[in-house]
Image (tube, rainbow, N blue to C red):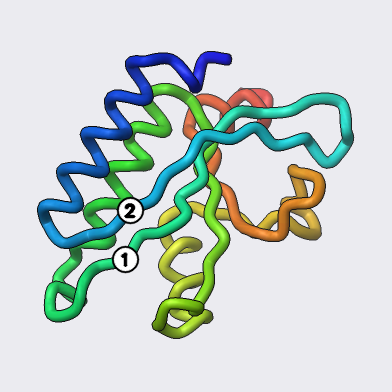
């Protein structure tokens, strides 16, 4: 599984450490999800948490961190998964809007891609082009 290589793990660890020092808490885990058609599975990372601490909010740090993570996603061609939740504060609709503004898709309806996963996903540029036949 390409996603579990030491290089990617190291880059994700460095990402987390960098953003923790800037007061942005991130929790990222590797995973593999089964496709909705049950024919295969794809590797990716789960962004379990992206939370800017207290008075550091509303300064663009969360956006900056997410953009950097998605650049890593594009670099290694892996899918990024999120399950937006207001469980630790914030407004659910605002959180979902944040992710959709960065290209995340809901895993339902016409964009259903993964079995038994109710969250959202971001497809890296290369994978998206392959799926579109370009």
Q: Is residue 87 left or right of residue 132?
A: left
Q: Residues within 10 Å of mark 1 (few under 14, many from 20)?
A: some
Q: Earlier in the sequence, mark 1 or mark 2?
A: 2
Q: Relative to 81, is 106 above or below?
A: below
| The one of 124 and 26 positioned closer to us in this rendering | 26
* Quarter location, residue 40: top right
Q: Quadrant of residue 107?
A: bottom right
User: Is 37 on the left or on the right of 91, as rendered?
Assistant: right
List the residue tagged with mark 1. Answer: 51
Residue under the image location 81 percent in, 45 percent down:
115
Q: Nearer the viewer, residue 2 or 88?
A: 88
Do callouts 1 and 2 mark residues in contact (Cβ within 8 Å)? Answer: yes
Q: Position of residue 97 (x, y in %)?
A: 47, 72
Residue at image point 51% right, 70% down: 96
On screen, residue 103 versus residue 117, left or right, reads left
- Nearest the viewer among 27 and 102 is 27
The residue drawn where x is 58% and y is 49% is 121
Quarter of the rendering occupied by the C terminus: top right
Cα separation, mark 1 vs mark 2, equals 7 Å
- Quarter of the image for residue 59 reads bottom left
Judging by the rendered image, the residue that carries numbered circle 2 is 26
Percent from the top left, x then y, of residue 82? 53, 55
Percent of width and height locating residue 93 = 52, 81
Report crowding for label 2: few under 14, some 14 to 19, many 20 or more residues within 10 A (C-alpha): some
Question: What residue is shown at x 13% (from left), y 73% (from top)?
Answer: 56
| SS assignment at label 2 | strand
Image mark count = 2
Q: Quadrant of the N terminus?
A: top right
Q: Secondary structure at mark 1?
A: strand
Position of residue 12 measured from the top left corner of the image (x, y, whole percent): 32, 33
Mark seen at residue 14? none
């Amino acid at each position: 599984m390409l996603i579990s290589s030491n290089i990617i793990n190291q880059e994700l660890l460095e990402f987390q450490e960098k953003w923790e020092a800037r007061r942005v808490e991130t929790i990222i885990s590797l995973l593999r999800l089964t496709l909705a058609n049950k024919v295969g599975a794809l590797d990716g990372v789960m962004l379990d948490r992206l939370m800017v601490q207290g008075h550091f909010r509303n300064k663009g740090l969360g956006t900056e961190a997410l953009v950097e993570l998605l650049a890593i996603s594009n670099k290694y061609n892996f899918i990024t998964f999120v399950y937006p939740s207001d469980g630790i504060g914030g407004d659910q609709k605002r959180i979902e809007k944040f992710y959709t503004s960065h290209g995340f898709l809901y895993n339902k309806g016409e964009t259903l891609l993964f079995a038994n996963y109710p969250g959202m996903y971001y497809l890296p540029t290369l994978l998206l082009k392959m799926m579109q036949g370009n």
